[in-house]
Amino acid sequence: MAHKILLLKGDGIGPEIVAATLVVLGTLRERFGLALEIEEALMGGCAVDVHGEPLPDSTLALARAADAILLGAVGGPKWERIERDKRPERGLLKLRSALDLFCNLRPAAVHTALADASTLRPEVVSGLDILIVRELTGDIYFGQPRGIEIDADGQRVGRNTMIYTEAEIRRVAHAAFRTALKRARRLCSVDKANVLETTELWRDVVTEVGRDYPEVELSHLYVDNAAMQLVRAPKQFDVIVTGNIFGDILSDLASMLTGSIGMLPSASLNADGKGMFEPIHGSAPDIAGQDKANPLATILSAAMMLRYALNEPVQATRIEQAVTTVLDGGLRTADIQAAGGPVIGTREMGAAVAAALR
Ligand code: IPM
Ligand code: MG
């Protein structure tokens, strides 16, 4: 049976990087028998323009019916000043929440050929292979109460609520331990337990869950120290598990260890293994429509989709190996090129990966 994929191209560079990824998936379909049924829908600013809201019900219904969702990127200056509930990012957050995609996997691995593209010295990052497991449907992103109000003195007060239930912590902790079991069996939980009660609970629950996984070496770091360690000696990490807001920040940081945020894919999974797959970078409005964006994060997100949601590990490996071949061959988009070298565009990079599939 064909896998049902919902494509959400989104805004900015979204349509270009998804188009390049479709060329790769199309080749897997034609040459390697991958059975896909692909539908498309609007989400983000493009949906605001057409339907007046970032996540129309029709898109949500298609998302629920699909086996997996592949997303480009959402947002841009055009929608920054509209009513908060209608902003593109809200569509993304609502989709994550509606599908209960609590488990966000963000790998940060350095391709050998790109060790020089990092701003850190090659010996600090070469061989790096970190996986950040970010909780994605709780924390200060969704906590109530929230908003901007006027207080008794007539001044504006902004408020958000950092909140986690133990059930929310427990399920993502289990997912992280299970992931660590398949890797180097080291898990570092990141919190701010010295200051924030929410994360004191986080530390307690992760420690309790850890008793079920004696094979995994569990450690804890405060988030400030974790940020420092990630830059100082990133190779000490295997799997990192953390809450929504810390995971947002640390995953951008970790991405730069690899040379470019344009390289990093992600998977957002629910308890049934259903998921949404997207590059961790944004919609890059400054380069949109110019055939400059690096499509590799999206192409690698499609590989994660094949592996995690569609049970097609062989096809996933084909994509990952093709990306390595292309990078080893020296092809570079602007974001991963050392100063002055020749660069290729989005389309050419997609075509090169498709051609390298074996
Ligand atoms: C990410 C992004 C999103 C987030 C934004 C676009 C809402 O930064 O996926 O990391 O904060 O989760
Ligand atoms: Mg982010």
Image: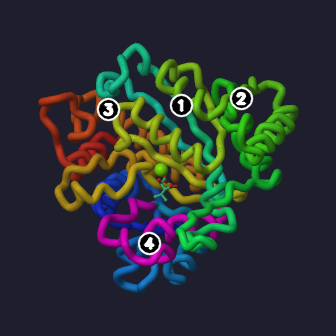
Q: Residues within 10 Å of mark 3 (few under 14, many from 20)?
A: some
Q: Residues within 10 Å of mark 1 (few under 14, many from 20)?
A: some
Report, in whole angstroms, how far the alpha carbon at label 1 lies from the one at label 4.
Answer: 29 Å
Q: Secondary structure at mark 2?
A: strand
Kind of residue sitting beneath label 2: His
At horizontal 57% and vertical 79% (from top left) the residue drawn is 61
Q: Report the residue marked by disc 1.
A: 227
Residue interval drawn in magenta:
71-100
Question: Nearer the observer, disc 2 or disc 3?
Answer: 2
Q: Nearer the viewer, mark 3 or mark 1?
A: 1
**Mark 4, secondary structure of its residue:** loop
Q: Residue at x 68, y 38 (%)?
A: 191
Q: CA distance from mark 3 to mark 1?
A: 32 Å
Q: Which of marks 1 and 2 precedes in the sequence?
A: 2
Answer yes or no: is residue 2 visible.
Answer: no
Crowd tier of the residue under label 2, counting other residues whose Cα lies within 10 Å: few below 14, some 14–19, many 20 or above: some
Residue on which disc 3 sits: 325
For marks 2 and 4, the one nearer the N-term is: 4
Determine whether the residue tagged by mark 1 lies in a helix, strand or loop.
helix
| Residue found at x 57% / y 55% | 310
**Mark pair 2, 1: CA separation:** 13 Å
Label 1 vs 4, first from the N-terminus? 4
Q: Are marks 2 and 1 in contact (CB under 8 Å)?
A: no
Q: Quadrant of residue 76?
A: bottom left
Residue drawn at the location 71% of the way across and 29% of the way down:
220
Magenta region includes residue 68: no
Q: At label 4, which amino acid type do we have?
A: Arg
